[in-house]
Amino acid sequence: MLPVLHIGPLAIQLPGLILLLGLWLGLSLAEKHAHRHGIRSNHIFTFAITAIIAGTLGARLVYALRFITAFLNKPGDLLSLNPELLDPIGAVLGAALIVIYFIRHHKLNPWALYDALTPALAVLAVAIHLANLASGRGFGAPTNLPWAIFLRGEWRHPTQIYEMIAALILLGYFWPSNARTHYQKTGLYGISFLATTAVMYLFFGAFHGDSVTIPGGFRSSQVIAWLVLATSLWLFSKRKPNAPGTEKEISNG
C-alpha cells in the first residue's frame, strides 16, 4: 500500500491523485464520444464539475446541520478539506438538484446524457479500485491462498485487484464505440453498464472483509448490489429497443 507519495519535500495523497486522474481521463473520454449520443461535448465537463461542486456543498451543509453545535464552535470547519466532514445523503441531494436543473435548462434527453457519461463512470470505476489498493481500503477477507496480500495484520484476498481487473474488462466491453453498435435505444447502454457493475460487486462482495455481514451470510455491499441490479433490470425492461428502422431517441443537446 502507498497512501502517500513523497517527492522531495512534497507529500502527495496518492489515492486522491489517482481519483482525480481517473475523473479527468473519464470525462475526457466521454467528451470525445458525446456526439454519439447527441450531446454536445462542452456539456460533459460543465455538467460533471457543476454536479461535483453542488454535491460537495450539499454534503457539507447537511453534515453541518447534523452537527450544528460543533460547527458553531468551530465555523472554520465549514471550509475544511477533510472528506470525513461530508454527508453522503447531502451529496446525493445536492448533485440531484443540479442534475435536474442542468437537464431542464439545456433541454437534454436524460437517458442520452447518462449514456454519454457512462464511459467516464467506467474509467472512474477502475480508478476507484486502484485508489483503494493504494490506500488499503476495500480490503478482502482473510485467506491462505497463494496470491493473498498482507494487510491489516493478516493475509487477505486482494479484492482491490480482483475488482480493478473486472472494471478494466467492463471498460473494454463498454468502450464508447460499442454504444451505437449493440444498443438500439438511449439509456440501454448506461443501464447495462450499471447492471453488470452490480453483478461484479455482488460476486466480489463475498470476498470483502470491510463490510458488515448480515443474517444469511450476505454482506451489506452485496445487498446494495442486489438492489441496484433489480432496479437496473426494471429500467432495462422499460427501455425496450426500438423497432427496426426507427430512429434512436437522441437529444441534440
Image (cartoon, rainbow, N blue to C red):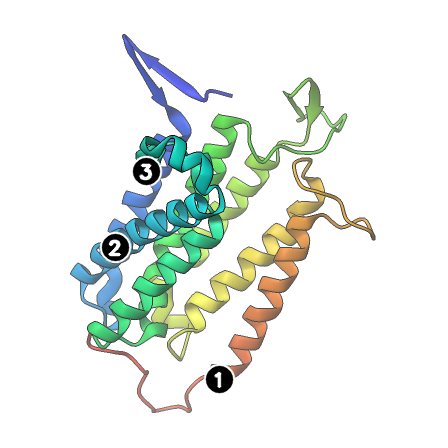
Instruction: Say which label, 2 or 1, has the lower sequence index.
Output: 2
Asked if residue 188 is positioned above or below residue 137 in the image, the reply reads below
- Between 29 and 114, the one lying in front of the other is 114
Residue at (71, 33) in percent of width and height: 141
Q: Is residue 163 left or right of residue 87?
A: right
Which secondary structure, mark 2?
A: helix
| Farthest top residue in view | 8
- Which circle marks residue 50 in the picture? 2
Which secondary structure, mark 1?
A: loop
Q: Count residues near mark 2 (Cα–Cα under 10 Å), then give few for <14, some for 14-19, many for 20+.
A: some
Residue 93 % position (x, y)? 41, 59
Q: Quadrant of residue 14?
A: top left
Label 2, label 1: how many angstroms apart (C-alpha)?
31 Å
Label 3, label 2: how many angstroms apart (C-alpha)?
15 Å
- Which circle marks residue 20 in the picture? 3
Q: Is residue 232 left or right of residue 94?
A: right
Q: Is residue 126 left or right of residue 11?
A: right
Residue at (67, 32) in percent of width and height: 157
Instruction: Say which label, 3 or 2, has the lower sequence index.
Output: 3
* Kind of residue at badge 1: Lys
Can residue 113 be seen in this snapshot? yes
Can residue 175 be seen in this snapshot? no
- Between 180 and 14, the one lying in front of the other is 14
* Kind of residue at badge 2: Thr
Q: Quadrant of residue 101?
A: bottom left
Label 3, label 1: how many angstroms apart (C-alpha)?
36 Å
Residue 24 % position (x, y)? 27, 44
Which secondary structure, mark 3?
A: helix
The residue that disc 1 covers is 240
Q: Count residues near mark 1 (Cα–Cα under 10 Å), then give few for <14, some for 14-19, many for 20+.
A: few
- Between 113 and 75, the one lying in front of the other is 75
